[in-house]
Image: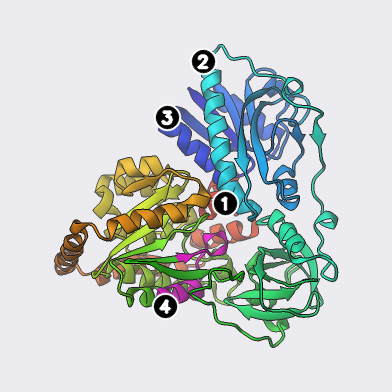
Amino acid sequence: MHILLIASAYNSLTQRVHAELRDRGHTVAVERTPDGDAVREAVRRHEPGLVLAPMLKTVIPADVWTRHTCLVVHPGPVGDRGPSSLDYAVQEDAGVWGVTVLQADAEMDAGDVWATATVALPPLAKGDLYRGEVSDAAVTAVLLAVDRFASGDYEPRPQSAMSGRASVRPYVRQELRRISWADDPTETVLRKLRAADSQPGVLDELLDGEWFLHGGHPEDQLRGRPGELLATRAGALCRATADGAVWIPELRPRRDAGGRPGFKLPATLALGDRLPLLPDLPAPLSLGEHRRTWSDIRYREEGPVGVLSFSFPGGAMSTGHCRRLLDAYRVACSRPTSVLVLGAARDFFSNGIHLNVIEAAADPAAESRANIEAMDDLVEAVLTTTDRLVVAAVGGNAAAGGVMFALAADEVWCRAGAILNPHYRLMGLYGSEYWTYSLPRRVGGPVAERLTSQALPVTATAALRLGLIERVVECGPEEFAGEVTRMAARLAPNPSTQSRIAAKKAARERDEAARPLAAYREDELARMLRTFADPAAPYHRLRRAFVRKESPEGTRPEDAAVAAGTAAC
């Protein structure tokens, strides 16, 4: 079937639906449609058999939905209506939620139901849940709805026959999100922060400025006057609540120095000179079983298995992130383990270099270079680890250099819901991270060329078929860490493991003799550095558009949306 996806942005769910439908043999076109006229034009141009909207903020015009079946994905149960469904669910700690695929109608979210799925919501950030549990449920419901439509004999059910009274709730405005630092206990503060992550953030006043707060994690030991800043750690701020404290990893100024809307940065970097002198606490690699605090890199062991997990906001890895992760990786490699699991966290694995930090730098070209070289150092360390097996455990989406980072491991295990974007082209970059060595080594030259030039998202199942990864792990986001640890524990004592370690050492020596890793790095960096140094290179306007949520000058809006969506994954 020929299916047209219309979306306000090529976000994570749109990418996943796109890739999942392609895997099932459908012909799928994707169009960014910011308004009704764009919807009309897209439908006219593609003449689809079915129109599907995984994430749409605009209304589908009546002259479109009366002539074509248009299915809309709503991140709420049957009867729920409004643009902030998931925000309410997280802020009110719903626990159990739903996703509904309904037919476009005159009233928003009120159409007949083609499919629905129930979803459990653990107490986590909205964005994490959206890319995890909600995405899984949405894909289940979408695929069922598409099959039902294709059958030609399914009649969608009116919502009035499936639920009680409709619940129509307005957009969650900032006054409903606002934190009362003097009164709100930690759990209330966390729910408000989680419900606004990753957009729009919680607007707050801090150090004589207006800031959107992004991300929230509990702290069980630090205490202070409610609202007081207590400490920093790895770029995050710790702030006192009425009965405890929370860590806030990122801030976004309401307006930048030029009067434009600001963009997210690590909290301490965003504050810059405004930041008062605070204790800068080390980020602990290991935590006690019952500790509640924030650290973006952690290490633990279970017998002969080491697990080095990391979780950076948006999957973006700045120069500092890369250097700290490399230090932690070296610590992990000093331990007497035979299998090292790298990743094993839910949500993003990695999306490569940190475009926001680069955009904020006084010299973006220099920061681009520093960031890519730090990524290369990290990837090189993984590629040259020859005394144990390294498994990249990809629990969430990965893109660009983040995919190539994973490919440096001996095996890549992906959760079934993960989406990979193994390319750089849409951000105007050639790429580094030794991809010209790792990618063809896994999939062959022709497939590597196709993946990097077509620049399309790839499901875990398709990645397995292509040879890009070794295993698909069928489990939910919450079960992924435990499942890959159990799998690694079974791998470690296997008699073949030691022989595999010896064989990989010999293979690395042969590869090094044929062409040193330094030669791959030198060739890749030469291309990247030419791009960084050229003010007219597309990378600079594409980066700026991605960071500032704009359409770059000289680029079609739909192409800019795809580039930004792929970078954000």
Q: Magenta stretch containing residue 320, yes or no?
A: yes
Q: For the point 75% across and 35% down, which residue is it? A: 80
**Separation of marks 3 and 2 at Cα, in angstroms:** 15 Å
Mark 3 = which residue?
24
Mark 4 = which residue?
327
**Separation of marks 3 and 4 at Cα, in angstroms:** 42 Å
Q: Magenta stretch containing residue 46, yes or no?
A: no
Q: Secondary structure at mark 3?
A: loop
Q: Report whether 19 appears left or right of 233.
A: left
Q: Earlier in the sequence, mark 2 or mark 4?
A: 2
Q: For the point 67% across and 46% down, which residue is it? A: 95
Mark 1 = which residue?
554
Q: Earlier in the sequence, mark 3 or mark 4?
A: 3
**Amino acid at the residue labelled 4:** Asp
Residue 300, given in percent of the width and then of the height, sits at 43, 69
Q: Which residues are magenta?
A: 309-328
Is label 1 or label 2 in front? Answer: 2
**Amino acid at the residue labelled 2:** Ser
Is label 3 or label 4 in front? Answer: 4
Quadrant of the image occupied by residue 162 = top right
**Separation of marks 1 and 3 at Cα, in angstroms:** 35 Å
Q: Is residue 118 above or below residue 335?
A: above
